[in-house]
Amino acid sequence: MSRTVAPPAAPPPVVPRSVLAARTGVAVVFALNGLAVATWFSRVPAARDALGLSAGRLGLLLLAMSVGALLAMPTAGLVAQRLGAARTVALSTLVVATGLTVTGIGALAGSPVGVAVGLCALGYGSGICDVAMNVEGAAVERRLGRTVMPRFHAAWSLGSVAGAGLGAGAARLGVPVAAHLAALAAVVLLGTLLAVRSFLPAAESGTASASAAPAERRRELLAAWREPRTLLIGLLVLVAAFAEGSANDWLAVAFIDGHDLGEAAGAAVFGVFVVGMTLGRTAGTVALDRWGRVPVLSATILLATVGAGVAVLAGSGPVAIAGVALWGIGASLGFPVGMSAAADDERRAPARVSVVAVIGYTAFLAGPPLLGLLGDRVGTLRALLVVPLLLLPTLALVPATRPPAR
């Protein structure tokens, strides 16, 4: 009696070492960018006190960073195609480091104008870097053959955790804002220059295309603005960015003012949020590969809605902090999954990611002044109820992230 023997399972495809090295380089760049941004956010309360600003005036000041980012976004895809992802990330991080340093000097001098100039540079450099590193990350993800983009954004969150922790420590030790920001700017710039050396060649990542003339690149960018799916993804990323950015801008200040915490404790609460973001993005890759984008995004948006509501309305400090953790986990996947969805077509990825980034970063433009002005009337903590009110309708946009049929 013959016995059927199952054929041996095919060995998993061998991933080239250059792709693995690029994966590590992209993760490092994401982490350092998160470190740079969180370093500023963790010292917002100290800068507010040094400048003597109300919530409304602070919101207008924070707007400078968003303006810088929005000035960068419309051309970021074209810059990445022209220079390649590696050179674009390196040059934009130089702008980020300069912006951090100028911001610290402005706070030390008690000059809102100086801080605004520094924040505009920080936002501009971060905006260009954001598009370039997401395009590079999407190219690496395709070559690995599995979902990894949320883990790149988890690396960004890990950098944010480090930035929040260092910020809390610096606040407790009384380290001047200028010295703190300048030291971290140097670390971020040096680390990024080393990391981009392992990026994929520009011809492999969809950037620096030698065959595309500048006029053709501009036509592709304009065409992306007319694509319904790209625009819907952009709206999803807009709300995801608002849910994340409102916590970045206001969570420490809101818990200091609304829950009577000290500056160091407020920075630590911000750290709880980014820890939640990191956990969500790390575990989210497994969930996305198993169940797909639509059900996972729907579940996490609902979780963020509940968490943000608990963080604001809970009468108990520990319960409110638990809500912050849920908020972080729930808000973790919208931005990276939106970027992956925009980059599903490698050839059109730079243009589409640039469009989605422009729409998404509008949240950083409108969010700070909106919440600041609302905070002047109802309190900074209560103003954060805008977040769950915007998240629920976003569920209707989630199907746009479904990968197109090939």
Image: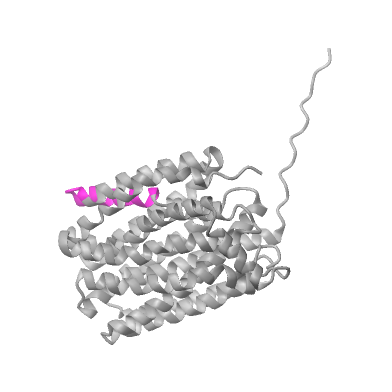
Q: Quadrant of residue 64?
A: bottom left
Asked if 151 appears above or below 256 in the picture, the reply is: above
Residue at the (72%, 47%) spot, across then down: 13
Residue at (45%, 82%) from the top-left corner?
Answer: 98
Q: How many marks?
A: 0
Q: Position of residue 206 (x, y in %)?
A: 66, 63
**Left or right relative to 78: residue 178:** left
Could you tell me which quadrant the N terminus lies in?
top right
* Residue 301 in which image quadrant: top left
Residue 349 can be seen, yes or no: yes
User: For this rendering, which residue is in front, 23 or 337?
Assistant: 337
What residue appears at the point 40 percent right and 63 percent down from the top-left corner? 362
The magenta stretch is: 313-330
Q: Does residue 318 belong to the magenta stretch?
A: yes
Who is closer to the viewer here, 67 or 122?
Answer: 67
Residue 36 position within the rendered picture, expressed as x and y whole percent measured from the top left = 43, 71
Place of residue 19 in the rendered image (x, y in percent of width and height, measured from the top left)? 67, 59
Q: Is residue 261 visible?
A: no
Give the x, y percent position of residue 351.
58, 63
